[in-house]
């Protein structure tokens, strides 16, 4: 593609200090370590650790013939290698996404987009939406934390950081993926939109038909610094959407409604509300066995919804997915049928088949204070009368190189809401596991530490001890990792399957392998 076509098609404002040569561009890239086979446009990004403006010479050596720089950069003439044509724009993060969309054939203009944002629940809502739209005969693409899919086929992408847990792919992977989806006939793209991705303008070219807000609770403050910045980042999604589905029960919902009221549709799971204050209401909520059911009241109609994820948060998640589809013209009965047929989402309140019939083991991604509290409350509420007599045993830790301020809060919640807590590792990354555990214990009273807390730094061993300790009717919860099949520590990323660890522990507990239940 000609440079002039690329710049014009992207719609970015730019300046040059010499006449722009109309050269052929065969690649657009922002990583100076990436070798380009032809003639590349290098986009300089200033990040938290590195500044692309410092690597113009390396980019030229890799094949760059032109570079897009930020207008307010401190770039000097001597920093620009001879033969590299330089262009300036106000926001290179925004420009990169728009350039890659144009370079990939503008796939964002060829499909309908639904974005899901919030601290917790994004993955569950996204999978519910995919089930509903496919039941309604749409071909769907999914981009999220657990996986990326075209229909039932999982597609992969390569991240430059193998230790990153990236819900929204970087632009260099995202826009080729969207082009692939468009080429394969995808009609609806359902995407988890993170605060990081929105802050870094990864989604700038996308206009969303519907944006869904699940909730906002403490998380990612290592990146955003405070809750106001976090909230502002989430709100970016609504500026580039036609309709907003909002969780009216969340404390931030009123602020969102005051800003975007003319495009908002409100959902509530509180029966004290009525159709005059919210447009979609979950009424007559019941937990029966391994499911939750309720009546969705909307548009002078009532539709029974049944969801096979037995948790209180499943009510709002499924109601928002139902609301989105109905507002988009999907028949309510079709949407309800799709939700009832869903077996669940990997790593979200996932019941593990361990072979131990007298106990239950669940895996969940809960890694924020609010998510952990909701998880423990849901498990206690949703258990059968027989299981109510048993203990709730929690295995959890906190991630390293992430928001440190939530650790003590999560420790306090764990000690208050679980009967026994194994505090362990959870992707310690470059931090010392024992220091993270110490931070968690800082939120727990000494008396509760003595009564309820067991410190087992090795996560596999913690799972083994928790399962082997469990008595009949007990529930063991493995929180924090969910769908992840790895553990990250100072030496890097290592394969780790919590399901297998739980099954191995149950086998030992049942006396089918070495030793017996003694720890």
Image (spheres, rainbow, N blue to C red):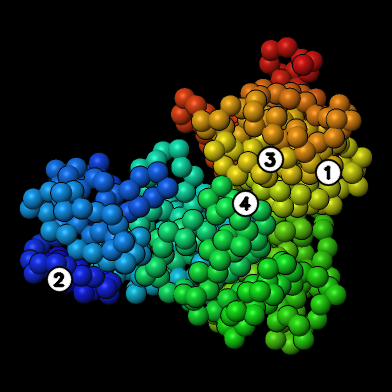
Which residue in the structure is indicated by mark 2? 4
> From mark 1 to mark 2, how far is it between C-alphas?
61 Å
Residue 303 visible within the image: no
The C terminus is located in which quarter? top right
Which residue in the structure is indicated by mark 3? 407
Residue 391: x percent and y percent? 86, 36
> From mark 3 to mark 2, how far is it between C-alphas?
51 Å
Which residue in the structure is indicated by mark 1? 417
The answer to whether residue 502 is above or below residue 513 is below
Q: Are marks 3 and 2 in contact (CB under 8 Å)?
A: no
Helix or strand or loop: what does disc 4 sit on?
A: loop
Q: Nearer the viewer, residue 300 or 54?
A: 54
Helix or strand or loop: what does disc 2 sit on?
A: helix
The answer to whether residue 425 is above or below residue 264 is above
- For marks 3 and 4, the one nearer the N-term is 4
Q: Residue at x 43, y 59 (%)?
A: 200
> From mark 3 to mark 4, how far is it between C-alphas?
11 Å
Dot 1 alpha-carbon crowd within 10 angstroms: few under 14, some 14 to 19, many 20 or more: some
Q: Give the numbered dot on residue 467.
A: none
């Amino acid at each position: 593609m000609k440079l002039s076509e690329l710049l014009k098609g992207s719609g970015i404002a730019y300046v040059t200090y010499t006449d722009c040569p109309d050269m052929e561009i065969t690649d657009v890239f922002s990583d100076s370590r990436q070798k380009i086979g032809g003639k590349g446009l290098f986009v300089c990004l200033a990040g938290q650790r590195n500044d692309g403006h410092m690597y113009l010479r390396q980019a030229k050596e890799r094949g760059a013939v032109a570079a897009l720089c930020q207008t307010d950069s401190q770039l000097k003439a001597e920093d620009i290698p001879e033969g590299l044509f330089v262009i300036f724009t106000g926001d290179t993060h925004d420009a990169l996404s728009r350039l890659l969309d144009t370079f990939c054939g503008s796939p964002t203009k060829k499909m309908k987009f639904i974005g899901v944002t919030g601290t917790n629940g994004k993955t569950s809502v996204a999978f519910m939406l995919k089930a509903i739209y496919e039941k309604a005969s749409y071909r769907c693409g999914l981009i999220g934390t657990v996986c990326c899919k075209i229909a039932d086929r999982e597609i992969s992408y390569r991240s430059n950081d193998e230790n990153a847990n990236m819900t929204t792919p970087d632009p260099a992977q995202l826009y080729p993926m969207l082009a692939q989806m468009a080429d394969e006939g995808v009609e609806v793209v359902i995407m988890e939109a993170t605060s990081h991705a929105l802050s870094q303008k990864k989604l700038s070219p996308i206009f969303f038909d519907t944006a869904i807000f699940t909730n906002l609770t403490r998380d990612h403050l290592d990146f955003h610094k405070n809750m106001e910045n976090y909230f502002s980042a989430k709100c970016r999604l609504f500026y580039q959407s036609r309709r907003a589905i909002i969780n009216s029960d969340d404390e931030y919902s009123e602020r969102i409604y005051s800003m975007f009221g003319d495009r908002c549709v409100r959902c509530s799971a509180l029966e004290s509300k009525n159709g005059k204050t919210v447009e979609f209401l979950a009424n007559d909520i019941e937990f029966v066995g391994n499911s939750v059911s309720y009546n969705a009241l909307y548009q002078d109609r009532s539709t029974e919804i049944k969801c096979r994820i037995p948790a209180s948060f499943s009510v709002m998640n499924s109601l928002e997915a139902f609301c989105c589809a109905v507002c988009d013209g999907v028949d309510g009965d079709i949407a309800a049928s799709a939700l009832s047929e869903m077996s669940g989402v990997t790593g979200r309140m996932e019941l593990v088949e361990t072979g131990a019939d007298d106990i239950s083991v669940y895996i969940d991604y809960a890694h924020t204070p609010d998510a952990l509290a909701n998880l423990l409350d849901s498990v206690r509420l949703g258990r059968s009368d027989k299981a109510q007599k048993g203990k709730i045993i929690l295995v959890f830790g906190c991630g390293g190189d992430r928001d440190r301020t939530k650790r003590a809060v999560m420790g306090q919640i764990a000690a208050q809401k679980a009967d026994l807590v194994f505090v362990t590792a959870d992707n310690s990354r470059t931090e010392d596991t024992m220091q993270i555990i110490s931070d968690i214990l800082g939120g727990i009273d000494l008396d509760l530490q003595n009564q309820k807390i067991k410190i087992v730094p090795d996560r596999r061993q913690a799972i083994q001890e928790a399962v082997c300790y469990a008595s009949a009717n007990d529930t063991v919860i493995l929180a924090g990792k969910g769908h992840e099949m790895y553990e990250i520590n100072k030496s890097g990323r290592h394969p780790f399957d919590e399901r297998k660890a739980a099954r191995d522990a149950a086998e030992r507990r049942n006396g089918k392998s070495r030793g017996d239940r003694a720890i």
